[in-house]
Image (tube, coloured by chain):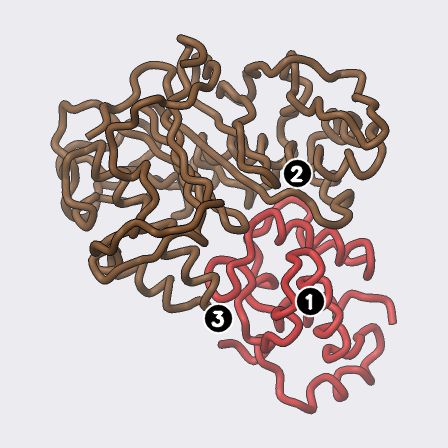
Chain colours: A red, B brown
Amino acid sequence: MSAAGNPPAGAAQGSAGRPGTAAIGPITDDLRAILASVTGRDELLHIPPGTALFGTAVGLDSLSGTLLLREIQWRFGVDVAAEDLNLDSLASLGTLAAFVAERVSP
Amino acid sequence: MPPVPAGDAVDVWWFDTRAETVGPAGLASLDRGERDRADGFLFPADRHRYQVAHVTLRQVLAGYVGVAPRAVPLGREPCPRCGGPSGKPVLLPAPGHSPPARSGRPPAGPGLPAGRTPVSFSLAHSGDMVVIAVASRPVGVDVEREARGCVCSLAAAFHPDDRVRVGSLAEPARHQAVITCWALAEAVLKCTGEGVMHGTGGFPVLSGLDGPGLDEPGPDGSRPAWSGPEGTAYVHGCALRRLPAPPGYRAAVALVAGPVESAGRHPADPSPLSRPGTLGAGRGPRRGGGSWRAFSRLTHAGHQ
């Protein structure tokens, strides 16, 4: 598990002070809410940041995954994967939150 | 043992994961990779769905190729788009016989003897349903649970022609059309082995259909202008059509070249898989109805 996939507790607050970087914690919560919404599964509101999104772990299918990315684009204005889902940023909930946090307008 | 469907025929098997249990023999039929993957799920319901899907897949394929479920030689071709390892799941031929086209790698481990009818398959699951398609040419199947909320943002992933057609519908009919359009596109991309990870907008799936099958009336009784009879489209090198699905689901099947023709429920299914019961080690048939367990063979001969 990468550091970005499981950020230490203080990381979100620390990074929030950098210009152009939003706090990871609230974005992670937002992503959990989007996940729960697009899948209709409330249990995804509580998954840890290191949870893999595709493949195994929560069993996110490709339609739900694509819908997740479209909702992120709509809500945050961040285009995670315009055409290709084979991205390191999609490895886990935490890596996706970090990717969005680095690009979202504060 | 059912014969491998010839020519344009496709066998379609449906299972409701709520009605299936997986016994020790079923679990023992999974290979190391499948067991590791099952162990990786966070929630028991996801693990169960995966186990049912893959134990069932092995049982169904074992019936066609005449080997024990655990001996079914499953492998993957390289992705025809990027050459990566996530291409089409296939039955591996015997060592020394390369799989047709695309694959440059010799198969690992045991395979099937050469000279027999090729068996292509595709597996999909969504919600509680598992669907398996079997044919003698490359085949792709997809099933998706109907939308329970707004999925309009998904239309941005479609080919521009499809985006326009779906966008012409009023909600909530548009939401179900989006799901159907996705299932059609994913069936094609699973048939070719590209998968959806490289994008779903490379070709239109709706405009290729004489009757796209998205012809359910909206709540107000209106139908889209392009509604028509169910038909077969020729898209991206595949024959594509919608597949009758359980209530609450949308499904599609694609077959390389040639038409996939109309569906008929098989009247006298020779396989015990058509009866509700336990997968793997023998428990008795489950009581209680409501499960959707069905077998059908789609052929050009029409409804049976």
- Crowding at dot 1, Cα within 10 Å, few <14 / some 14-19 / many 20+, comes out as some
Q: Chain of mark 3?
A: B
Residue extending furthest toward the bottom: A10
x, y (%) of residue B53? 38, 49
Q: CA distance from mark 1 to mark 3?
A: 23 Å
- Relative to B111, does residue A92 appear above or below in the rendering? below
- Crowding at dot 2, Cα within 10 Å, few <14 / some 14-19 / many 20+, comes out as many
Q: CA distance from mark 1 to mark 2?
A: 28 Å
Which residue in the structure is indicated by mark 3? B42
Is B205 left, or right, of B44 in this rendering? Answer: right
Q: Amino acid at mark 2?
A: Ile
x, y (%) of residue B61? 26, 38
Name the mark nearer the viewer: 1 or 3: 3
Callouts 2 and 3 on one subunit: yes
Name the mark nearer the viewer: 1 or 2: 2
x, y (%) of residue B130? 44, 44
Q: Which mark is residue A99?
A: 1
Q: Chain of mark 2?
A: B
- Relative to B113, does residue A71 appear above or below in the rendering? below
Mark 2 secondary-structure assignment: helix
Which residue in the structure is indicated by mark 2? B179
Q: Residue at x 25, y 33 (%)?
A: B271
- Crowding at dot 3, Cα within 10 Å, few <14 / some 14-19 / many 20+, comes out as some
Is B139 left, or right, of A63 in this rendering? Answer: left
Q: Chain of mark 1?
A: A
Is B122 left, or right, of A43 in this rendering? Answer: left
Q: Residue at x 42, y 38 (%)?
A: B14
Q: CA distance from mark 2 to mark 3?
A: 26 Å
Mark 1 secondary-structure assignment: helix
